[in-house]
Amino acid sequence: MSPSPLVSAFRSSLSEAWASGAGLLLPLGFFAGTATLVPFTLGSEAELLSRVGPGILWLALALSSMVTLERVFQADLQDGALDLWLQDSGSISLIAAIKTLTHWLVSGFPLVLLTPLIGYMLGVPTEKMIPAMLGYSMGGLVFFLWGGVAAALSASVARAGLLIALIALPLYVPALIFGVQMVEAGLDSPSFLFLSACTLFALGVAPAAMGAALRLAAE
């Protein structure tokens, strides 16, 4: 496969994110806002806040990952780039994976870097911060890959935010469960292995599913 479609997909994802002005700031703001407001509903008990803090961060991460998914493939369908990529001899699944991973790099990875600050505010113990950041990196990747499948399935639908949420949220559940358990039990727990398996499964299956969905959307 010629590398030019892959480079084109990578560059278009970066330019779409920065041209909109919200590729980085919107998910960060949603993540910080959710993680900051939810504790106000739980009262002022520090022990309770410390116990539920990792779960709140995971919930905020899952919801934040969907904020910008709607525009991952819609612009390519509207400007004809998707048709050109489908006419190329290369793999549309690989191009879809590149676009989704670039989207995670721009919109998802900064959430991981924000974790220590938000975690400190929620009273997450310092010794759990490294497992939390590793878990959020892996879980965030899973969320964006399955979210990419939902975005590909709804690429031809206007205002598809709710549809993307309905499709993607059930796929988030395994990574969400094992991720929260991993933060509590540490890196030597079975939950870390299950979360790793979720990540590898998403990396193996989601690109093919995105490719098939984009072919249907282009027809």
Image (tube, grey):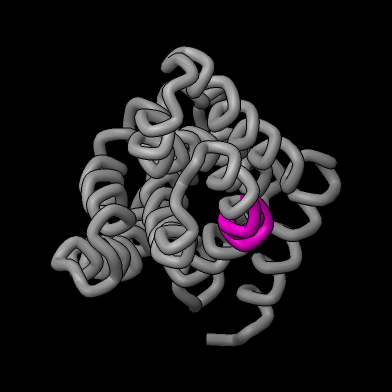
| 105 over 149 or under it: above or below | below
Magenta run includes residue 108: yes
Residue at 54 percent of width and 46 percent of height: 119
Magenta part mainly helix, strand or loop? helix
Name of the residue lying farthest toward the left:
190
Magenta run includes residue 62: no
What x and y, as percent, mark residue 77?
60, 44
In this rendering, does residue 192 appear at all? yes
Q: Quadrant of residue 74?
A: top right
| 119 over 116 or under it: above or below | above
What x and y, as percent, mark residue 81?
66, 55
Boundaries of the magenta span: 104-114
* 33 on left or right of 184: right
Residue at 65 percent of width and 65 percent of height: 9
Residue at 46 percent of width and 13 percent of height: 41
In this rendering, does residue 216 appear at all? no
Depth check, front residue: 64 or 92: 64
**Image quarter hosting the C terminus:** top left
